[in-house]
Image (tube, coloured by chain):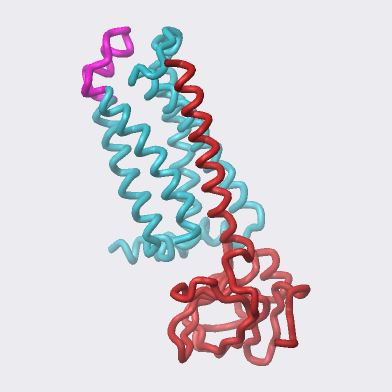
Chain colours: A cyan, B red
């Protein structure tokens, strides 16, 4: 099922166009980095503020803004990442670093969903004390996103 | 507390940068042997496209991954889709990974069906 899905993707007109274009891949790769930059820059401020490492009050007021812009970066990274993946899906599905990245990404997305629908996140945005559960989630988020970047960079060397 | 954080962040950034740049060396020639090697094998897979064109081959010595030039170098060498097929015999001249357990060779030149594709013309050595 995964096999046929990945070969359908590889044989799609879009994947073929990216494979044959001199510009598409480097541009998509750049977009992927821009997405990661936006995501990580915002998530870093967000998580460090929740953890209390950064204590500026101004940051507390923009928690939801940081979260939304991080979401934008995440969307960009995922969309460009899917297109980069489509160039040779079969190859990446056999790459241990890529598989590790996918596993870590699932954990990070799960963590993100748990936080988004938690009460303590709603309360933290309106200035309440950050619960210990939310702090734990922020620490996990920070570590997971950094690990995802490392695993992602490792794909070329695995 | 703030001072400590700035310093920690700085050290982390420097450490990650150094570590990342050592890893990037894999894309040059630092990870390969100095000497050029020739090997003959049968092509089992051909990938022409970004980020890196490659062949998979089976030799008497086992299965090897052959890294070709980057997409532009590979095209300039004349190696485009349709030039070779799975099952063709290929003679590779290139640099093997310096790690003896890593079966990757970075091709300087490939010869398939009597046709020569030179990915790095300035690097071909004939005297070894």
Left/right of residue A108 with respect to residue A70 in the rendered view:
left
Residue at the location (40% across, 44% down)?
A148
Q: Which percent across, then down, holds residue A110?
A: 27, 37
> Does the magenta run of residues contain A83?
no
Residue at the location (44% across, 81% down)?
B63
Pick the residue in front: B100 or B112.
Answer: B100
Which image quarter: residue B101?
Answer: bottom left
Q: Which percent across, then down, holds residue B55?
A: 53, 76
Left/right of residue B64 with respect to residue B96 in the rendered view:
left
Residue at the location (69% across, 64% down)?
B72
Q: Which percent across, then down, holds residue A39?
A: 46, 32
> Does the magenta run of residues contain A123?
yes
Q: Residue furthest right?
A: B122
Left/right of residue A21 with respect to residue A135 in the rendered view:
right
Pick the residue in front: B6 or A145.
Answer: B6
Pick the residue in front: B73 or A25.
Answer: B73
Quarter of the picture containing the N terminus of chain A is bottom left
Instruction: In the rendered view, tell whether residue B83 sits above or below residue B97.
Output: below
Left/right of residue B110 with respect to residue B62 in the rendered view:
right
Residue at the location (37% across, 64% down)?
A94
Instruction: In the rendered view, tell whether residue B60 sits above or below residue A24.
Output: below
Quarter of the picture containing the C terminus of chain A is bottom left
Highlighted magenta segment, given as a residue range: A116-134
Q: Which percent across, then down, holds residue B123?
A: 74, 74
């Amino acid at each position: 099922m995964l096999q046929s899905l990945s070969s359908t993707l590889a044989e799609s007109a879009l994947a073929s166009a990216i494979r044959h274009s001199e510009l598409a891949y480097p541009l998509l790769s750049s977009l992927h980095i821009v997405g990661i930059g936006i995501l990580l820059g915002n998530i870093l401020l967000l998580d460090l503020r929740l953890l209390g490492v950064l204590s500026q009050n101004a940051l507390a007021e923009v928690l939801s803004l940081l979260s939304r812009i991080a979401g934008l970066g995440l969307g960009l990274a995922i969309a460009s990442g899917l297109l980069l993946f489509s160039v040779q899906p079969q190859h990446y599905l056999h790459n241990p670093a890529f598989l590790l990245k996918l596993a870590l990404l699932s954990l990070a997305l799960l963590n993100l969903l748990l936080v988004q629908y938690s009460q303590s996140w709603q309360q933290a945005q309106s200035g309440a004390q950050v619960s210990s559960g939310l702090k734990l989630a922020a620490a996990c988020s920070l570590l997971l996103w950094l690990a995802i970047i490392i695993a992602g960079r490792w794909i070329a060397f695995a | 507390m703030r001072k400590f954080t700035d310093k920690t962040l700085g050290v982390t950034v420097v450490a990650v940068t150094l570590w990342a740049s050592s890893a990037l060396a894999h894309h040059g020639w630092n990870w390969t042997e100095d000497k050029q090697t020739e090997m003959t094998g049968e092509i089992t897979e051909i990938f022409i496209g970004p980020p890196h064109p490659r062949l998979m081959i089976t030799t008497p010595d086992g299965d090897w991954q052959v890294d070709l030039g980057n997409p532009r170098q590979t095209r300039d060498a004349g190696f485009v889709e349709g030039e070779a097929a799975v099952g063709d015999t290929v003679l590779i001249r290139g640099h093997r990974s310096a790690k003896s357990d890593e079966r990757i060779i970075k091709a300087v030149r490939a010869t398939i069906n009597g046709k020569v594709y030179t990915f790095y013309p300035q690097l071909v050595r004939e005297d070894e």
